[in-house]
Amino acid sequence: MQNLTQTIQAIPLNHYILLSAIIFSIGVIGVLVRRNAIVIFMSVELMLNAVNLLLTAFSVYRGDAAGQVFVFFIMALAAAEVAIGLAIIVMIYRNTNSIDINVLNRLKW
Amino acid sequence: MEKYIWLIPLLPLAGFIINGLGRNTLSKGVIGFIASALVFASFVLSVATFMQVKESGAVNDTIFNWFEVGFVKIPFSFMIDQLSSIMLLIITGVGFLIHLYSVGYMHDDAGFGKFFAYLNLFVFFMLLLVMGSNYLIMFIGWEGVGLCSYLLIGFWYTNPSYADAAKKAFVMNRIGDLGFLLGIFFIFTTFRSIGYNDVFAKATALHASGTDFTLITILLFVGAVGKSAQLPLFTWLPDAMAGPTPVSALIHAATMVTAGIYMVARSNILFSLAPHTMEVIAIVGLATAAFAALIALTQTDIKKVLAYSTVSQLGYMFLGLGVGAYTGAFFHVLTHAFFKALLFLGAGSVIHAVSGEQDMRNMGGLKGTLKITFITMMIGTIAISGIPPFAGFFSKDEILAAAYAHNPTYYVIGVITAMLTSFYMFRMMYLTFYGKFRGTHEQEHHLHESPSTMTIPLIVLAVLSIVGGFLGVPAALGGHHWLHQYLSPVFEGSVKVLGEHELSSSTEFLLMGVSVAGALLALGYAWNKYVKDGHVPVSDTEERPALANLSYHKFYIDELYDNIIRKPLDWLSTFFYNVVEKMGIDDIVNGIGKGTIETSKGLRLLQTGNVGFYIFMMVVGIIAILVYSFISIPGLK
């Protein structure tokens, strides 16, 4: 355990932050540009996990377990969200025979 | 006695409530009895109060504390001093006689109950006006009598011209009331109080430090001009004759129209300290007296003659006030209340006899059938013409003497007006009672003397018109001028400021001689013209000499007001309606509405329904929030 911590701390914190930011941005861009609902969903997961990564990294560097506790909460939440989100997508597919979000263009006046 | 003062106004109010609620259920006899009896009870109480004031000076009574805000404390309280005690006697005394007369006069009218309810309400407000111990209570009464005047002028409201006359009176009075109200405001800001005693005490002190009261007194006078029908607001009073004749006698001759004089006399110290206002009052009064007398010369409606004569006599009273003869002016209020009420009631009796006819050209020769009316009216006419020893002589001469002491020009105009008064009053008498009857046969057949409820008030008032003058016999004629002595506490402060001008007895004799000779001369001329030559005013279709025409048409004052006030107002209203309202305000309001619709139309296009776009906007928003919170972290810049 001591060894793992040291290994993680061997890499500078900046690198973790940069990696998380990149993954998060990929997630955002994925949400914005893709039309497939499942891909968008996966992009959202990317964003969540980028945050998780950052939280664990901070946690290790500060020697404080609270960050990792948050990560567990987020993972549990993400699991619940996936269950509901996928169910919605299944319902959309049943109704429209498509999972292209541009089909859902009735959300207007 | 002090404990019962509040009953004096309360009794007529009770009469108003009883008669107002029971106007359809109570019988005429009961209504008439309640109304007259309650006013008579007030009269008895007034006499008792008068006796007490005579014994021990002014009586104060606070009924309750009306309101209190900060340092402003307005009690609802009464103050009966020498001035108001005499007003009380006039209002309740003459008021009672007129109530009695109305029982006979209005007997066949469908609105009998309503009439007496209004009449009682009027007496209530008039009593409030004179009894209040501060300007606010006077103002309540002031507005109240205006309301009752409106209701009673328009009593026969189904006739549109009567209803118009009522509205005219109301609007004209409103102009004056505004002045009065502003005057009260200025009094309040100047003296920090509106109680009479406070204000008058402070006025004397403040004047020593050079405060000018001209503005306050001019505003108060504007109020008096409206209520007492002076130039230029007098035109409502002749039109007010549309009301039943007892109303003309009570409201538009004896009491309400003298409210303006009462108010000025009440505030005499303020006026005495404002010499410019005094001059204005004297000139307005004199001009009104002369002007109204000129109009009265050619009128053919018996009530119109009396109406203009009232305006003219009110002008005299203001002349008296203006030259500082407060007692004289008030003396004239008193005597005028007697003989003018008498003349109006007499005219009512005449109108009653000739089945509602008011045009003197269709009367004549009535002295045989209407004996009591004729004799009493003749007494009234002699009294108003200023022929000794009747009431009008003493009061009028006191005013004229004071006018002479102030400025002989005023005296000359005053005497000429007195001659005109004598002429038109005797002209009225001769046209009505002498010669041959000029009406229809049916009217002639109907001629009858009025019932005793109508003639008794006439006789009482005639007696008062004869003896009323002896209340104020001047020293020059060996009298003591009881009224002057009685009222002296009220006018004490003013006398100190103005000083007392004494005329020598011989001058006074000369002045009296001139005015009496003038009146007799005019009398003789009228006799010559209307009795000896049997002259009758021409009918409306025939030509008149230019001057007579001018007078007959009231100097076209109504037309003048129509042209310089109503028509420009009309024009301005049309202009505002068509241009400002339709093109300005309408456009702004509609523009706001249209603008909202158009912007909404544009904005709703933002909602495309595209989920991707929504998400994009959400991200943009989040980034914006991030950037904002980033730059707003202190110490980061």
Image (spheres, grey):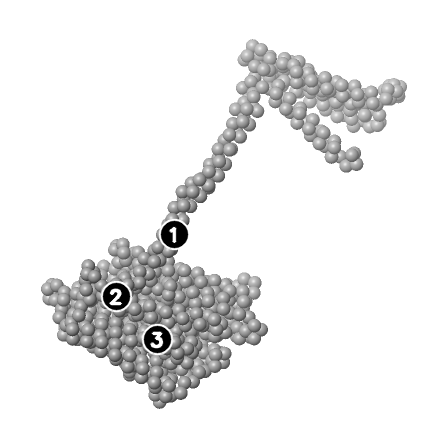
Looking at the rendered image, the disc whose residue lies closer to the viewer, 3 or 2, is 2
Is B627 located above or below residue B221 in the figure?
above
Image location (x, y in percent) of residue B150:
33, 60
Name the residue that disc number 2 marks: B548
Foreground of the two, B374 or B49? B374
Q: Which mark is residue B568?
A: 1
Name the residue that disc number 3 marks: B414
Within 10 angstroms of label 3, few (less than 14), some, or many (20 or more) residues?
many
| Element under disc 3 | helix
How far is the residue under mark 1 from the one under mark 3?
36 Å
Image location (x, y in percent) of residue A96:
55, 12
Q: Which mark is residue B514?
A: none
How far is the residue under mark 3 from the one under mark 2?
21 Å
| Element under disc 1 | helix
- Letter of the chain that mark 3 sits on in the rendering: B
Foreground of the two, B73 or A95? B73
Residue type marked 1: Pro
Residue type marked 3: Gly
Ranked by sequence position, the earlier of labels 1 and 2 is 2
Residue at 39 percent across and 76 percent down: it is B409
Residue at 35 percent across and 74 percent down: it is B413
How far is the residue under mark 1 from the one under mark 2?
29 Å
Looking at the rendered image, the disc whose residue lies closer to the viewer, 1 or 2, is 2
| Mark 3 on the same chain as mark 2 | yes
| Mark 1 on the same chain as mark 2 | yes
- Please identify the residue farthest to the top as the structure is shown: A97
- Residue B172, quarter of picture: bottom left
